[in-house]
């Protein structure tokens, strides 16, 4: 949680908090705007959720953790929503089975939107009354939580549309690259040594980014850009999915059981390779970063390349002090974009385009402690059987990502906007 030094927050700070609240909440509605009521109810797999549920659950967070206890006279929009839109907070009581969220025809989308309006009006009252030191970190947590779900709205609807015979596009206009070959790949050297990683005590960060601590790094090199579609196609054409020596044991078992032969959303027909994207089915763009690969695929590609995946602390050392800029949500590209020619030199674009798999298991930092109460369930209990990803994607807001940010997914996951950056030990 964030740390603040004054006993009460100034009017300017309250106004800034209110404006940020409005911006984040409006962004969710913008992402949901292209979806019909039917679209917003679809759940195409247990790991995904309907857009309607995302919009309601993020609202539930503010109602449950802020309004119920802190706004005198607040009346819940519907008391039944406390259970209905609880995701996994066991200390708050029961919650529906995740895989059944797509069966909730009620409440309607219109009612969910009214729920959001009800809570937004109450949150404006709460903030206007003046925010205590205890409440501002919780508001910021709720906003960052909503920004996580904004990205999930896009990942989940992409998967849902891909399962449909009509293959509808979320955004119909096509974004052509007109770039047949990728920018040259460069290698950037880092001397290693003792480095500090993790979020500092000031400002907002999730609990899993702290405490800041020292770590020892051997000298290493990091690729200047992400692996491209054309490079990954070389791996496929070299029978990469048919060579068990390239794969971790669990990865090889998954490849065989799932019949993987290419990244998720790739298809091959008489016209060659196609890829399903938020902008519909398009010819495979050779210079774009390869997306929707699992940790297993990223690791196998790295072995095939004679390289490896970076450690998360290597990635953070490279990103420390860099400006938060790149192909992020505000650009509205809705796709990873090719590295610009000349990007393979001394600089390295680390934020945006795709989340980057690291070889680091998602574990607690030294000295980590879960927060008391239900908020302590936010991250800590997932520190098992997952790997860390870094850097954000084209669906991540620039106000949400930072060098210390730790995303995490199980190694078989592919539906998130995930890509590959290679690393090497310094020779």
Image (tube, helix red, strand yellow):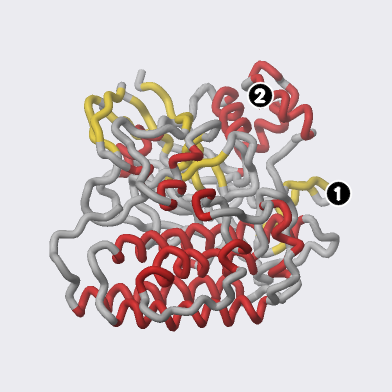
Residue 42 picture location, percent across and down: 74, 63
Which of pointers 1 and 2 indicates the residue nearer the eye? Answer: 2
Q: Quadrant of the C terminus?
A: top left
- Give left or right: position of 133 versus 102: left
The x and y percentages for residue 3 are: 22, 55
Q: How many marks?
A: 2
Q: Residue at x 53, y 39 (%)?
A: 420
Mark 1 — residue? Answer: 270
What label sits on residue 84 in the rendered view? none
Residue at point 48%, 79% (across, down): 75
The image position of residue 200, as x and y in percent, is 23, 46
Label 2: which residue?
250
Q: Residue at x 51, y 82 (%)?
A: 117
* Residue 281 visible in the snapshot: no
Q: Quadrant of residue 73?
A: bottom left
159 or 59: nearer the viewer:
59
- Mark 1: few/some/many CA within 10 Å (<14, 14-19, 20+): few
Image quadrant where residue 232 sits: top right
Q: Secondary structure at mark 1?
A: loop
Q: Earlier in the sequence, mark 1 or mark 2?
A: 2
Residue at x-position 72% and y-position 24%? 253
- Snapshot quadrant of residue 326: bottom left
Q: CA distance from mark 1 to mark 2?
A: 33 Å
């Amino acid at each position: 949680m964030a740390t603040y030094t004054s006993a009460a927050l100034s009017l300017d700070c309250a106004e800034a908090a209110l404006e940020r609240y409005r911006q984040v909440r409006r962004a969710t509605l913008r992402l949901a705007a292209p979806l019909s009521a039917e679209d917003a109810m679809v759940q195409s797999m247990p790991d995904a959720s309907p857009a309607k549920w995302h919009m309601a659950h993020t609202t539930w967070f503010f109602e449950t953790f802020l309004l119920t206890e802190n706004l005198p006279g607040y009346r819940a929009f519907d008391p039944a929503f406390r259970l209905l839109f609880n995701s996994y907070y066991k200390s708050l009581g029961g919650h529906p089975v995740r895989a059944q969220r797509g069966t909730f025809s009620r409440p309607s989308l219109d009612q969910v939107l009214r729920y959001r309006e009800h809570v937004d009006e109450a949150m404006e009252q709460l903030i206007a009354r003046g925010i205590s030191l205890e409440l501002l970190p919780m508001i910021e947590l709720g906003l960052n939580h909503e920004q996580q779900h904004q990205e999930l709205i896009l990942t989940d609807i992409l998967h849902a549309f891909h399962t449909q015979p009509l293959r509808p596009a979320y955004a119909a206009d096509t974004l052509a690259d007109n770039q047949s070959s990728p920018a040259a790949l460069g290698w950037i050297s880092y001397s290693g040594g003792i480095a500090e990683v993790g979020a500092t005590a000031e400002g907002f960060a999730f609990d899993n980014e702290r405490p800041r601590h020292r770590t020892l790094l051997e000298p290493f090199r990091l690729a200047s850009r992400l692996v491209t579609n054309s490079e990954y196609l070389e791996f496929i054409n070299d029978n990469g999915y048919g060579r068990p020596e390239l794969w971790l044991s669990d990865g090889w078992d998954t490849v065989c059981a799932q019949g993987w032969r290419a990244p998720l959303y790739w298809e091959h027909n008489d016209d060659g390779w196609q890829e399903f994207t938020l902008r519909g089915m398009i010819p495979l763009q050779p210079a774009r970063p390869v997306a929707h690969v699992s940790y297993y695929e990223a690791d196998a590609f790295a072995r095939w390349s004679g390289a490896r995946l970076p450690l998360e602390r290597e990635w953070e050392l490279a990103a420390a002090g860099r400006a938060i800029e790149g192909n992020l949500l505000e650009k509205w590209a809705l796709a990873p974009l090719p590295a610009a020619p000349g990007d393979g030199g001394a600089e390295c674009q680390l934020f945006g385009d795709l989340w980057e798999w690291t070889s680091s298991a998602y574990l607690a930092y030294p000295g980590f402690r879960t927060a008391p109460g239900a908020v302590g369930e936010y991250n800590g209990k997932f520190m098992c059987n997952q790997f860390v990803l870094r850097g954000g994607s084209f669906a991540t807001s620039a106000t949400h990502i930072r060098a210390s940010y730790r995303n995490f997914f199980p190694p078989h996951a592919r539906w998130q906007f995930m890509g590959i950056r290679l690393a090497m030990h310094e020779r």
